[in-house]
Image (tube, rainbow, N blue to C red):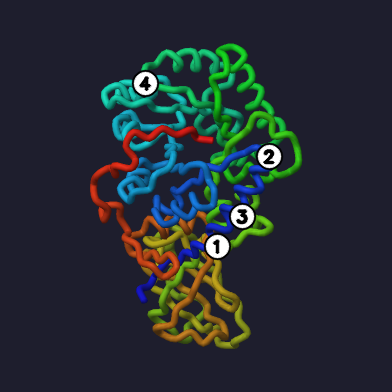
Amino acid sequence: MNAPRLEIDLVKLGHNARTLVNLLSHHGISVSAVTKGVLGRPDVARELLKAGVTGLADSRIENIQTLHFAGVVAPMTLIRSPMVSQAALVVRHADFSLNTELDVISELSKAAQSAGRSHGVLLMVELGDLREGIMPGDLENVVRRVLCFPNITLRGIGTNLACRSGVVPDAVNMGELSRLADAIDATFGPVLSVISGGNSSNLEWALGGGDTGRINNLRLGEAILLGCQPLHRRPIEGLHTDVFSLVAEVIEAGSKPSRPWGDIAETAFGAAPPEEKHTSDPNGTISQAILALGEMDVDPAGLTPPQGIDILGSSSDHLVVDAGQTGLKVGAEVAFQVNYSALIRAMASPFVTKLANSVPYPNSFDAFPQKRPAASEGRSFTPV
């Protein structure tokens, strides 16, 4: 079997999604499953839809295209602000998009008119994390302008926290989003059907037993994929944290000195020289192994090795480990757990084979026919 490879357990993935959908439903909150972490894999998307998510969301329109080319039919939301240069593509393939700029929405409107479609817009509001978002004081004016664009439907408002600055979703900022929704509806009538509170970082707040107000949607990726919440990377009770395993093959094994010798400068990626490996061996040797896995394939800092193995360093194509007493030999395989950073880089690498329950999958959406499936034409969805 090819290595390196990323093994995906769809059964565990479905369990995670179903569990979160059920938990949040008791609070009146639906789940949009974010597929960017798996580059829009159709088999993952179908498992998520079977688990009860109300729609799929992705930051890259190319991933949404992948889903359409594979015949996946569901409400699709582009969750990164659209590029003007891709307005026609966004209108063609995404039912909804998250927006902050009137110039972008104007281009979406023109593209929607040309295509004879209606495109749904959710306006993102800045609530402290200082990534994308309209300042709260400007929201009313933006809403007024958006309601005038032809072929554009205002579906709701949302926010994003914890991604850039680590701002924690709490009763204060979520309460502010609810108050803004109430104010918009009071001014313009009931125009907002979706109040999207954020991402996996919102789970502690949403499931904490407090008032969730107007929030009726969350965009979940990491919590479903890795079974943890991103604020502190703690496992979520009842979820699987081993949906993904990254397997690499040993290409060299043997005893080596525990520290380098000669004049020392920066490593290939600009890191400081590795620290001496402490060992009880009086000669300062360790049982070192090299695996065919490197920075081109994964974020090595996001890997958790099995017990008894320590990661010592990496370069473009090599991962160096202390094999300890495991007796690793050339040709042996080592399975690592991954964090979100390691996952998305491994998924994006054309050198990492992807297997979902032992079924191989192409590394590029180019493997799919370049046409929109008839079943997805003329879609009309509500994203909650």
Left or right: 368 as drawn, with respect to 325: left
Q: Which residue is mark 3?
A: 228
- Contact between marks 2 and 1 (CB within 8 A): the answer is no
Quadrant placement of the C terminus? top right
Q: Earlier in the sequence, mark 2 or mark 3?
A: 2
Q: Is residue 271 above or below residue 173?
A: below
Q: Quadrant of residue 376?
A: top left
Residue type, label 3: Cys
- State the count of labels: 4
Q: Which residue is mark 2?
A: 27
Residue type, label 4: Asn
Residue type, label 2: His
Task: Label 3: state its secondary structure.
Answer: strand
Q: Earlier in the sequence, mark 2 or mark 1?
A: 1
Disc 3: CA contacts within 10 A as few (<14), some (14-19) or many (>=20): many
Q: Which residue is mark 1?
A: 12
- Rounded to the nearest whole Å, what is the CA distance between mark 3 and mark 1? 13 Å
Task: Label 2: state its secondary structure.
Answer: loop
Which residue is situated farthest in the right direction here? 209
Q: Which mark is residue 151?
A: 4
- Rounded to the nearest whole Å, what is the CA distance between mark 4 and mark 1? 40 Å
